[in-house]
Amino acid sequence: MTTYYDIHCHIFNKDVIIRKLVNVVQSLLAIKDLLDKEATSAELKFKIDGINRTLEDVTQETSEDVFEALDQVYQGNVVTTPLMFDLTYADDNDDDENQNKRYRRRIKRIFWLISVALPFIKARVNRKLKSPELAEAFDKIKNRVKEFEESFDKKSDEEVEIFDNANYDQQIADLEYLANKYETIKPFFSIDPRREYKGNVKLTDKLKEKIIDENGRFAGVKLYAPAGFSPTDPILMGTSKEAGIYELCQQYNIPITVHNSNSGFACFSSVLKVRGDVLLNGNIVKPKKPLTFDNRFFSRKVSQAIAERAKKLNHPKLWELVMKKFQGLTINFAHFGGSGQIMEYVNYSIPHKRIDEDEFEDAILPLSNKDKDLIRQAYKLNRRKRILRDDLSIAERAEVWNALYRAGFIDNWAKAIFDIIKNPNYPNACTDLSCFSEGTIIESPENNEAIFSIREELKTFKTSFFDKLSDYEKSKILYGSDYYLTQFFGPSMEQYFNDFKDAFGNDFETIASINPKRFLNL
């Protein structure tokens, strides 16, 4: 029997998940969007039930309970690489005196946002659909979140706090215990360079202890730059005096997984001191003063806040600086930019239907004459506005899309990541398809219940993109689930796994066995 690999998953228990309640806020806002789009009762019920299912899965007492829930789907036939998450400095403005003393107030802010959003959206649903079932589903969310809040309010000397070193140490202990007990668990160790700046540890020594040494139980490194640091931080890049994390990983063939989409999680801070490069207004710079973000994290603009922090701290352009210096690095740019970005790239979706003429001409000015002519022919001029033609063929749209990408009108992370991983100068760079959540609600053939399926979108990705790749390029694509976080946004874990196997057919072995085995250096 073929051994498969889930190269991207999480098995946090309830001690860690409270921070992830921000995903409940995002899911509730998604329900609001569905109401605005005239969604059906079945679509709304599926989304609401999905929040409940995920909250139930993750409110387990131990990390082993969470792993066993995942293994009910994998049946012991899938090697998992649970990714640790160092949350200690998620709310850190580089202020040693008040380090992370704000986080309890801000977590309470999440509870408040949910308490405000729930009755508002429930009332809208009731006015529109008058469904007792949906009202009951909302009440379940309210009760589960209330349990979280009551648990959060209880404090004792023995409790693990959400953002302190005890939580960090607890994750390490849990994952080492699981890696010792289960041969199918190969965890990744989280690195945040701020841990070294605070004087707590020498991170290269910690990496040797946890991965390289004979008793090390971790198989790789996890980096999450949007949590508040630059991919080119000197602790990672090294200095003229000593090697950094990347050099050590390259020397010992240690795989690194980096979050690389414009969604997910990001630091809470509105002002952040960053060491290394950031992306500002399309330009890579080393900031001389702390970054100030336009969007506050704890607000109804949480999605925009996350996207802003991701772009400034984690854009593929920043990671290309890393690759140019460490060309042999074994690195996985997780999420391939995000499933929305993937499908925009695959379908060559052009978001700019109407563009101001002056803005249009300024943007295409640096392009070649061929590209300029190509873009101009795709847009009609009408009263100082360029309007996209609606009769472009697929081939024409692809050419125009790529020209617009070169002009900077389109900032697509999937395209930027693909340009990195297909580059022969970076033979060990790859990407995973974890948290793929583009799909549709369909009726289950077994029990006529609504289910969320990503199968058709995955098939589009495979036939329109994957099948056209060279063997070298195909070797750069990995399977990942992002369990259990993907369930806030998409299908159940069982549906997710089955949809991938069905959509990829015989090529599932390529992305879920051959490629990840190479990535893990097994």
Image: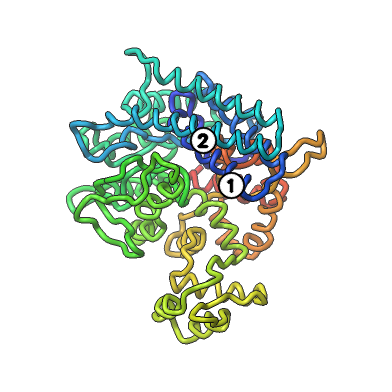
Res 195 → quadrant? top left
Q: Position of residue 8 (x, y in %)?
A: 52, 41
Q: Position of residue 453 (x, y in %)?
A: 69, 45
Res 297 → quadrant? top left
Left or right of 270 in this view: 457 = right
- Disc nearer the start of the sequence (2/1): 1
In terms of depth relative to the viewer, which is nearer, 325 or 9? 9
The residue tagged 2 is 117
Residue for point 27% across, 51% down: 291
Left or right of 178 in this view: 442 = right
Q: CA distance from mark 2 to mark 1?
A: 13 Å
In terms of depth relative to the viewer, which is nearer, 337 or 273? 273
The residue tagged 1 is 33
Q: For mark 2, give the secondary structure.
A: helix
Left or right of 371 in this view: 239 = left
In terms of depth relative to the viewer, which is nearer, 318 or 245? 318
Tell me: residue 256, above or below residue 166. below
Q: For mark 1, give the secondary structure.
A: helix
Q: Is residue 225 visible?
A: no
Q: Which mark is residue 496?
A: none
For mark 2, does the 10 Å Cα neighbourhood hold few (<14), some (14 to 19), or many (20 or more) residues? some
Residue for point 52% across, 49% down: 335
Q: Amino acid at mark 1?
A: Asp
Residue for point 51% across, 25% down: 145
Q: Amino acid at mark 2?
A: Ala
